[in-house]
Amino acid sequence: MDERSVPGGHLSAAIVADTVAPAGWAQRFPMFESFEFRDFRWLWVGVLASFMSMSMLMMVRAWLVLDITNGSPLALTWTMVSFAVPMTFVSPIAGALADRIPRKHMVILSQTGNVVMTLLLAGLDLAGVVHLGHLIGIGLINGSLMALNLPSRQAMISEVVPEHKLMNAISLSNAAMNITSMAGPALAGLLIVLVDTHGAFFVIAGIYAISAVSVAMVNAGGKSMARSGKSIIGDIRAGLAYSFGDQTLRGLMVVVLIGVIFGSAYWPLLAAWAREVLDVGAGGLGILNAATGVGALFGSLMLASMTGYKRRGILLLVVCAGWGISLAVFARTTNFAQALPLLMLVGVLSAIFMSLRMTLLQSHAAPEMRGRVISIGMMSWGLMPIGAVPFALIAAAVDTAFALMLSGILLAVSTVVFWIIYPSFRRIE
């Protein structure tokens, strides 16, 4: 049995006696070694179902917004922002709750809330009374529930696998997310054709329910960490002080911020770039997005296979700089055939960056602080649309290719500057 004690006497790793898969799994397939653990397998299914439903919901909701607003891009933007903003402002509260309420219960509660909200949206759509205010209001609630979900779900990973398998487990979880980024929109589009948007919402609610049930099957996460005796605000302050007072965690937060500010512009601007530079339609844009998704999946699996790798601080910085360089080179290409492999490379490097930064945040945070540390890292999800705004303005003033090239150059240069002024970061394992 592999047990790791944490404050309060709880265990943060899986109880191997009742979670291990058939012997020899890890030896035959080291890339998938975390699937040895029964709890991780259920948690992985929950991640797959959660992000599948979320990616489908984003697609169907966007289609419905365009339908009821006569194709208004401003309405679509406000709907997207309604989901993203709570990720920034609710995450600190969610992190504090994840360290004082059983994490398993937090995940189940948030997914159940998503079931209810999606069923409500389906009912409004079926009745023909849905309007933009409903979509923005429900988007705010969905975003808040996702913010409550993610810190607890991520922190649970460290409770179901031993620490030396944490990078593998997080990479496999991110691989599930990357699968849904490719499959979710395609499935959502098919459902819209077959059963209209209201029917798609009913299916999405069912997938959210599967996610809740799968997490309920996990044995770990049913006990809270040791109570601090402080208020929620006090716990948030303690989490911020801990995260930015620790040299390693502070450095990780800076690297995350660099990636968010300079590396996230290509997601919202890819469609504009494809139209301006390659003059492609929806089909071509779908292929470009798929290339990024395939690259991201490959990157997550590649990191999962790097078992026992130690020099992870250097790896994170090299990957971040490479991400910037590949993005800058991609932005200047004018050929579809050249754009595809470059987008795959962008996907590979960005996925490794995302998985590795979460691994390091969890590895270097005390168990009783993990929820709060992860929540600070998760705030970047909500900051991504904000980070893309300056480059969108540059794209409007000059052109999209220049804006994307500039974002890539700034990402690479900022990483190199951080490498020089923060030498101790390179020693992080």
Image (cartoon, rainbow, N blue to C red):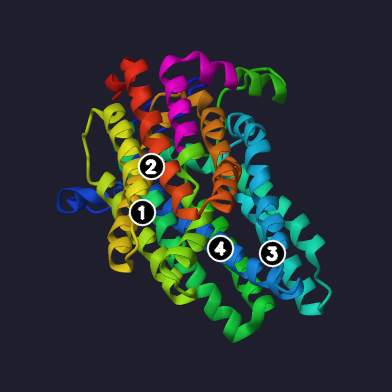
Disc 1 vs disc 2: which is toward the camera? 1
Q: State the CA–CA distance, disc 1 to disc 2.
A: 27 Å
Label 3 sits on a secondary structure element that is: helix
Q: Is disc 3 in contact with disc 1, using a CB cutoff of under 8 Å?
A: no
Q: State the CA–CA distance, disc 4 to disc 2.
A: 21 Å
Instruction: Please state the horizontal and vertical placement of residue 91, each as a whole percent of the image.
Output: 62, 37
Q: Which residue appears at 55% of the width and 46% of the height?
A: 394
Q: Is disc 1 in contact with disc 2, using a CB cutoff of under 8 Å?
A: no
Q: Which residue appears at 34% of the width and 20% of the height?
A: 425
Q: Amino acid at mark 2?
A: Ser
Q: Which residue is mark 2?
A: 355
Q: Amino acid at mark 1?
A: Arg
Q: Earlier in the sequence, mark 4 or mark 3?
A: 4
How crowded is the residue under tag 4: few (<14 C-alpha within 10 Å), some, or many (20+)? many
Label 4 sits on a secondary structure element that is: helix
Disc 3 vs disc 1: which is toward the camera? 1
Q: State the CA–CA distance, disc 4 to disc 3.
A: 10 Å
In which quadrant of the rendered image does the C terminus lie?
top left
Q: Which region of the structure is painted magenta?
A: 239-259
Disc 4 vs disc 2: which is toward the camera? 2
Q: Which residue appears at 46% of the width and 33% of the height?
A: 258
Q: Earlier in the sequence, mark 4 or mark 2?
A: 4
Q: Of all residues shown, which one is farthest toward the front?
A: 398
Q: Which residue is mark 1?
A: 332
Q: Earlier in the sequence, mark 1 or mark 4?
A: 4
Vertical order, 120 against 241 (above or below):
below
Q: Which residue is mark 3?
A: 118
Looking at the image, which is closer to me, 257 or 266?
A: 266
Q: Amino acid at mark 3?
A: Thr
